[in-house]
Every structure is written in structure tokens, then in C-alpha cells.
Image: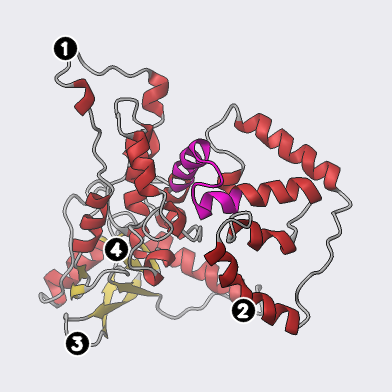
Amino acid sequence: MQVLFKIIRQNPHSAPTVQEYQLDVSEGSTVLDCLNRIKWEQDGTLAFRKNCRNTICGSCAMRINGRSTLACKENIGAEVARLQKIRQSQSSDPGQETDDSIPEITIAPMGNMPVIKDLVVDMTQFWENLEAVDPYVSTRSRQVPEREFLQSPEERARLDAVGNCILCGACYSECNAREVNPDFVGPHALAKAYRAIADSRDDRTEERLNQYDNTQSGVWGCTRCYYCNAVCPMEVAPMDRIGQVKHEILERRDRDDSRPVRHRKVLVELVERGGWVDERKFALLVVGNFFRDLRGLLSLGPVGLQMVAHRKFPFTFEPSEGTNEVRSLIEAVRNVESQSSEPIESKL
């Protein structure tokens, strides 16, 4: 089948341009196979990373038709079918015949990282952010062991998902939080952070949680957009791992310890009390820390005055008609969470 490849090409100090290459390829060919053919047969100047060709090393991560993935993992037939399905879902006439034009595949460098050349990006900050969370198991308090640090199958199973991470950068590339907040370390780093927390051989849990309990660089900087889970080629589900770190923080912290912790705990308390959030109290209790944070209370003044002026401030609160049912649901979730790994607050 004939396929038109549109590749975004760029040098460090130049604007990106689109260059087109047409190939006759089989449906089973991978995108990496096609890139190799373009480089070998048509344009030897095309730059991209590759290594294992077997979804192990993560080197060939790039954006293919708008999503970050591994070029060695995606084959042409499946990608063309995916694009056709998207077009049909967006069409005003779902029953229309399939477009007979040559399918196009657009390939671009990963996001949130500066371009070195073409599809090769500078991953320096990616690695520095990983290093910042210190993702290494610490055994310093145990000195030199006389025997191996043995783990039960259950303890080891907690590490299975994040242990599959190949650090390809796909999640980092699509991270909305990283795009707007340069201090956020990224989903890859926090997934590895959970790996250290979950490891029974590590002895720095409290120190780590203090580090990750941060509104900018830590777990509270995550916007929960789900993109990292959607694009991860190894099903690590970084957002879920971030949620598990939040769980550990919420388990060990009181609402007075930090605003993010207070936000989640107060939210559940108000919903449990009235069936939904009492907007009159929420900001005062969270930002004002139960009227103990004078600076926080003063910061609410301008917003509060604008709400009153525009008649947006609720002077009364009517509890939900289903308050008892809401309380029953919360209690049921708490009973379940006592036997699972994630609390109700970390889901909010």
C-alpha cells in the first residue's frame, strides 16, 4: 500500500518544516521500518533515535499522528485503521464510503523537550527530573547485610507495574502539567518515586513523602488529564502511580499539614455533611486553614467582593436530598479502601 509520510523537520535555531516522503509498504511494517527505508533510500539526512526495535529500550519514542508512542511498536495497518476510525467518528455522515486517497502519517518530535534535530530531542531535563526524586532503593540504615533482602511475592507484586517503565518519555511528552509548569518533575519521575516508596527494602519513606508533598514539583502538580496513562506503551499507568503516592501522603498527614491535603480532606468532610460541597465554607476552611491563616483569608477578600458584587456568592446552603445516601456511599468506599491501596481522598 502507498503511504504518505509527513515528517516534521527542525534544527535547534530554526522553525519546523514539513517534508513529505511516499513509500510502498506492507501493512505489517512498523513506523520505524518506514523511517529506516526513508533514511536509507530517500534522505540520509533524516535524524531519529532507534536501538532495540522490540519495544524494550524506548529510544524511538516520537509523536505519531498527534500522540507520543514508540515507532517500533506501531505498525502501518493498525495506524491507518485508527485514523480512518477517527475520521468516521468525526464525520457528519458515518455511513459514507471510506476515503480512497493515499493515507497520511504525520511524525513529529516529542513535546516538552527542545529539538536537537528532526525527531531527536534533548532529554537532559527529563533525566534531571528523574534524578531529582532520587528513585533508588535506600538501605543505608541496614549497613552491609549478612543475607539478601528477601521480599514476599505480595511485596514484589506491588512493584510490577512501575517496574515495566522503559523511560521512553512518551508520558512526559504529553504531560499538560509539565507544559504549563516547568517545576513539575513529570509523570515518569513520580511513577519511579512510587516504586521507591512501595519497595519494602527502602527506609526513607517519610523523607520521600515530605519531598513529593509539593504543590509545584510534586504529586499535587498533576492535573489528572490522563494523557500519560493513555500513551504509555508499557501500561505503567503513571497517573495511577501518582495517585498511590497521594494515598501514602494522605494516610500519614493531617489536614493542617498542607493545603493540598486539607483540600481533599475538607472536600470529603463537606460532602459527607451536606451531600455536596458547601461553597460558603470550602475556600475559608481550605485557604484560610479554619480561620487560622490570616494571609490566606486576606487573599480571599478581592475574590469574595467580586462574587458578592456579581451576585455569585451563596449566602445560604441547602443540603442535598440524598445526603444519607451520599454518607452511605462514602462509608462503603471507606470500608473497601481499608482493604485496598487507594483512599477516597486520593481519587478527588
Q: Secondary structure at mark 3?
A: loop
Are dots 4 and 2 in contact, CB under 8 Å? no
201 to 316, vertically: above or below: above
- Type of amino acid under label 2: Pro
Q: Helix, strand or loop at disc 1?
A: loop
Q: Does residue 69 appear anywhere in the picture?
A: no
Say how many tags the image has: 4
Residue density around tag 4, few if under 14, some if 14–19, many if 20 or more, within 10 Å? many
Q: Is residue 48 magenta?
A: no
SS assignment for the magenta stretch, majority = helix
Q: Which mark is residue 31?
A: 4
How far is mark 4 from mark 1, CA to CA?
Answer: 50 Å
Q: Secondary structure at mark 2?
A: helix
Q: How does the figure colour the protein chain or chains?
A: secondary structure
Give the residue type that dot 3 points to: Ser
Please state which of residues 121 and 219 is positioned toward the viewer in this rendering: 219
Callout in the foreground (4, 1): 1
Q: Picture coordinates of residue 238 (x, y %)?
A: 41, 49
Say the numbered circle drawn on residue 211. Answer: none
Q: Which residue is the site of mark 3? A: 14
Which mark's residue is nearer the viewer, 3 or 1? 1
Q: Three-letter amino acid code at disc 4? A: Val
Residue receiving disc 2: 302
Residues in magenta?
242-264
In space, the residues marked 1 and 2 are separated at their CA atoms by 63 Å
Circle 1 sits on which residue?
146
